[in-house]
Image: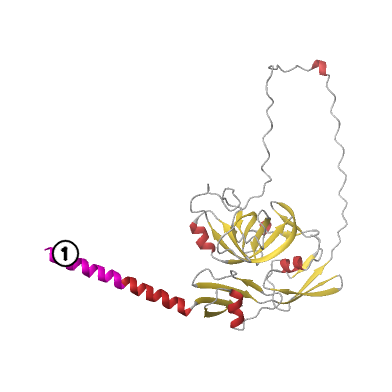
Amino acid sequence: MLKNAVTFLRSRSGAMITIVILCLVLFAGRLLSGFMYVVIDDGRRTVLTDHSRDVMTVLAKNNITLKDGDMLIAPEASDGFVTTVEIYRSYPVSITVDGQTITLQSTGETVLSAVLASNISTKSSDIITPAPGTPTTPNMNINIERVTIDYTPPKKPEPAKPATPNPDSQPKPATTPNQPTEAPPADTSNLPKSVLVFNPGEGSLPTLGDDHQLITPGGTYTVKQVISVSATAYYPWRGYGQKNASGKVARPGTIAVDPKVIPLGSRVFVVAADGSSWIYGYAIAEDTGGVVKGNIIDLLLMSKAECIKFGRRKATVYVLE
């Protein structure tokens, strides 16, 4: 019986050693073959392998170049065996306003984003054609028509002044000595809310007002920068009580960013790149992430199911003053 037990243990040990050797051989083979890069260049997918972890070096080796205006979404260095690299090629778009035409580069954002990027001052009464939420296309011409509205609101009649009561005839309320005065509750009705909404109504979409003023249902904000990004979603797997990279409680209305692109603490407004298919709204950049590099943001949502449904989508981020 003892002999059989020894034979059994030897056979099990031999099998384990064989499995370990096979794993080591496969791992070594993977290292020898290099890292895998999935390059999506304007929708065209190419799979590359290289021993370098530097994304720009790999692109240069394969004669993939970037010109001014192109948008690259990728980590600075490969963080695993498979790295996804997205390239959105820029194309010319012209804007005609005040009898002049200027040309700038676009990467598929909306007409509104192109107007903001041009630093052209507009007013809410101006007519922008095509509609601000329309995605741009190569050689598109955007026209801004100035409209001046002269309107003088009618004067409201002054209300009649109420009679001044005689203080001696009014009953005085009873008072309690040393009674504390209770402060009125803070008004939170006008605070902006951040909720991911698909296919929002027209009244929920932001519009461009005077001097780069972003007019939203939650308030009017001054835009200091417009950034085209790739948006993903996450939720705090340990619960909403956990702290984010800023040391604050993770909650909806906060996003993860690359601080090199969007500084932590920035107030932003996030909407779909097409300007209408979905809206996240007002948010604060308070978190970071290992794969949130470059023009990538991560939206905090309520559940894992919401995150899976959202996936990865192109978005426009308005960085607010």
Task: Tell me, yes or no, if residue 131 can be seen here.
Answer: no
Please state which of residues 77 and 301 is positioned toward the viewer in this rendering.
77
> Is 240 left, or right, of 169 in this rendering?
left
Q: Quadrant of residue 273?
A: bottom right
Residue 178 seen in the figure = yes
Q: Is residue 8 magenta?
A: yes
Question: In the figure, 239 relative to 129: above or below?
Answer: above
Q: How is the image coloured?
A: secondary structure
Magenta part mainly helix, strand or loop? helix
Residues packed near mark 1 inside 10 Å, few (<14), some (14 to 19) or many (20 plus): few
Magenta residues, as a range? 1-18
Asked if residue 52 lies left or right of residue 136, the reply is: left
- Nearer to the camera, 35 or 190: 35
Residue 262 horizontal/vertical position (percent): 67, 60
Residue at the image point whose x is 88% and y is 44% from the top: 155
Above/below status of 60 relative to 309: below
Measured from the top left, where is residue 307 in percent x and y?
Answer: 52, 60
Residue assigned mark 1: 5
Tell me where residue 275 sits by quadrant.
Answer: bottom right
Q: Magenta segment: does it hold 302?
A: no
As helix, strand or loop, the secondary structure at mark 1 comes to helix
Give how far across and how far down residue 56 sits, in percent: 61, 76
Three-letter residue code for mark 1: Ala
Residue lying at 83% horizontally and 22% vertically, measured from the top left: 165
